[in-house]
Amino acid sequence: MAEETFQGDVPESHSIDASNVTTSERWLYWVAGGAAIVQGLRQRGWGGMALAFAGTGLVYMGITGRSPLYRALGFHLVETTGGPQRLVVRKTMTIGQPAHELYRFWRKLDTLPTIMTHLESVDVLDEKRSRWTVKGPAGSRVVWDAEIVNEDQDKLIAWQSCDGSQVDHWGVVRFAPAPGDRGTEVTIELEYEPLGGSFGAALARLFGENPEQQIEDDLRRYKQFMEAGEIPTIAGQPRGPDRLSLRRLGAGRTAAFVSSAAAESGRPLPAAGGAS
Amino acid sequence: MKAVCWQGTQDVMVDTVPDPSLLNPRDAIVKTTLTAICGSDLHLYNGHNPTMRAGDILGHEFMGEVVDVGSRVTEVRPGDRVVVPFAISCGHCFYCQRGLWSLCDNSNPNAWMAEELYQDSTAGLFGYSHLFGGYAGGQAQYVRVPFADVGALKVPDSLTDEQALFLSDIFPTGYQAAEQCDIQPDDTVAVWGCGPVGQFAIQSARMLGAARIIAIDRFPERLAMARRGGRVNAVNYEEVDDVVECLRDMTGGRGPDACIDAVGMEAHGLGPAAWYDRIKQTMHLETDRPTALREAIHACRKGGVVSIPGVYSGFIDKVPMGAAFAKSLTFRMGQTHVHRYMRPLLQRIEAGDLDPSFVITHRYPLDEAPEAYRIFNNKQQGCVKVVLKP
C-alpha cells in the first residue's frame, strides 16, 4: 500500500516490499528446507530427489522471504514494527450515487448488516463508538467495539477496534467523485491480524472464506442496494431434486432430501470450473 | 408446480417443485401461459456449462399472467399479460441507463463467479446456469421475475401468445444482430445458421433494407423457411465445395457487406478444421467450435461488419485475426439488450410487418419437455422451434 493513502487517519504507517513472509517464518523455512535436502540426499532415488527439490524451494523462500504460494494466493502481509503479521485488503468499486448519499448510509453504521451479511448487528454506542457482532461457527458470536478515528463529511470514514477487543483491526472507506455522471468511486481498506496468522489466512482462502472476496462482496451489495434498491438473490427460490443423488442415497432417505433440496440455500457454489 | 429441471448432460425431467414466492420488493410472480426451448438451452442440455446443478429449472423464453407483485412494482399489476426479457436488468446502473441492458451490474447474485471467468459480471439470466445467477427459469408453471418493473412488458390482447412470446429473446436477438450490421441500401448480408435466431436475423435484415440476404445452413427445411419473404438466396454448405468461395462468387468477388454468425460455439462443419475443433473440444482443450466465425471473417468484404449473436462461452482456436485486422472488419457481439427492442418490435408485430410465430414447428405440453428437447437437439422431424404449454 502506498504510504500517502494512510493520510494519518490510521495508526503508524507500514511498508510492504516484495517479501511476503515474516521473519519467524523465514527461519522455519531455513530449518525445514535444510532438513528436507539432507533427508532427500540420504534417501536417493526419485522420492529423495523430489524431497531435496522441495527442500531447495523452502530454502529459497527462507533466503528471499518470498513465498510463491502466498503470492499465488494474492497475499500482502505486512510486518509492523515488533508486532504480529497483519493482512491488508483493499477493494474499490464505482457506485452510481452521489457521495453524500453513500456517506450517509455508511455513517449510520447500524444499517451495515444489510450489505455485510456476515454481520449480525452494529449497535451505535455513542457519537464515535459502536459495537459489532459477527456470527461465528456453531452459533458462536464474535463481538468487538470499534471507534471512528477520523471522518470527513462525504469523503472518508476511518475506524479502529478499541483496545482489548477480540478482533484487532482498522479500516477506512473513502468516497471520491467518479468522472462525469458515473457516481462515486468507493474504496474500502482494511488491515487486520488474520486468525491463525498467514497460514490460517491461506487456509481460509482455500476454503472460500477469503477476506478479499468478502470485502468485494460487501462492496458489491452496497452498490446493488444503493443503485437498484435491493440485493439480488436466489435464496428461497424453488429448485428440482437432484435425481442422481437421490438414486445414490436410496429410497429411504428420499423424502428428507427432497424437502432440503426444494429451495436454494443461497450459499455460493465453489468456484466455476472455468473455461477448461 | 411443474417445472423442467436439468439433471445432467442430455437429461432433463419434469418435476414437481414448490411454487415460487416474492423474495425482493421489485419481484413479480408470473403464471406461465407459453414458454419455449431456445437454441442456447441446448448448450446447457449438452453439458457445456460447468455451473449447472442437478435440479436447476430451465427456460428463459416465457410469457404469462402476473399473479403477484412486490411492494415496489408499480408498472405491472396482477392480471396483466406480460412477456419477459431473458436478461434480468435493474434499470438503474451505468449500463441499464445507457441501454446496455444485458450488461447490468446489479442482477447477478453470483457476480463473483462471472468475474472469475470473464473478469466482469453481466446481467443475471433466467434458467441459464449459476454463472449467470442461478435464477429458476421459465419452463415452469410459475416464475419469479426480479426487477419486474423494468422487465415485464404488457402485451395487447390483439396479439396471441405465439405472436408475442419471442419478444423475450429470439426476435430481439435476430434484430440486434441485423441492426449491428449497419445495413445500407444495396447491401448483401450473409447469415450463418438458420435456426430460430438466424431466421429472425434474416427477416430483420430485410426489414432494415438489405438488398439481398444469403442464408447458410445444411437442413433443407430451415433453408426453405429462410426463403420466406423473398430476397434470400440459400446455400447448403454440404452441397458446395467451399462456403467462402461460394459467397465470393455470389457477390461479384467482393464478399458480403456484413456477416452474421448465428451459430456460435457448437458449430458443425466439414473438413479437417471442423474435426480439429471437435477433437479439441472433446478433450477440453478448447471450449467452443468457431467454424462459422472463421468463415464469416474470411468471407466478409473489406471494411465490413461481423455480427455475432451466436453464443460463445470460452476460448477458441485459429481465429484469423490477421485477416480481420487486414480487412478492417468491425466486430459486434454480445447478449441481446432485449429491453431496448421489445416495444419497437411489439409495434412491428402489431403493424403486421412480421408474425414471429412462423418459426414454430413443434408444440408440446410442458410434461413432454424431455421429448421436445431430444427432438430439437437432434433436429429431427424438421424441428426449428419448440413451444411448451404448461
Image (cartoon, coloured by chain):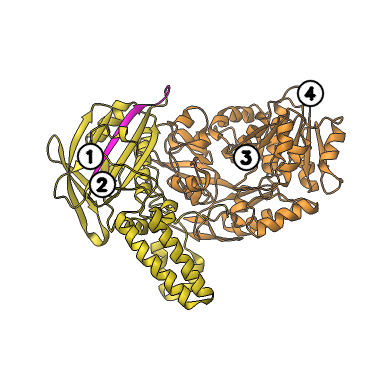
Chain colours: A yellow, B orange
Above or below residue B367? Residue B149 is above
The span picked out in magenta is A170-181
* Mark closer to the observer (2, 4): 2
How far from the left and from the top, in percent, is residue B319? 70, 43
Are circles 2 and 1 on residues that touch, CB within 8 Å? Answer: yes
Instruction: Assess disc 4: are there few (<14), some (14-19) or many (≥20) residues with their C-alpha within 10 Å of its C-alpha.
Output: few
Residue that mark 3 sits on: B170
| Mark 4: amino acid | Asp
Are circles 4 and 1 on residues that touch, CB within 8 Å? Answer: no
Residue that mark 2 sits on: A80
Secondary structure at badge 1 equals loop
Chain letter for mark 1: A
How far from the left and from the top, in percent, is residue B381? 74, 54
Q: Is residue A98 left or right of residue B207?
A: left
Q: Is residue B193 visible?
A: no
* Mark closer to the observer (2, 3): 2
Asked if both marks, 3 and 1, belong to the same chain, the answer given is no
Residue that mark 4 sits on: B186
Asked if both marks, 2 and 1, belong to the same chain, the answer given is yes
- Residue B303, image quadrant: top right
Q: Is residue B246 visible?
A: yes
| Mark 2: amino acid | Thr
Q: Is residue B167 left or right of residue A183?
A: right
Asked if both marks, 2 and 3, belong to the same chain, the answer given is no
Whole-number angstrom distance, CA of label 2 to CA of label 3: 59 Å
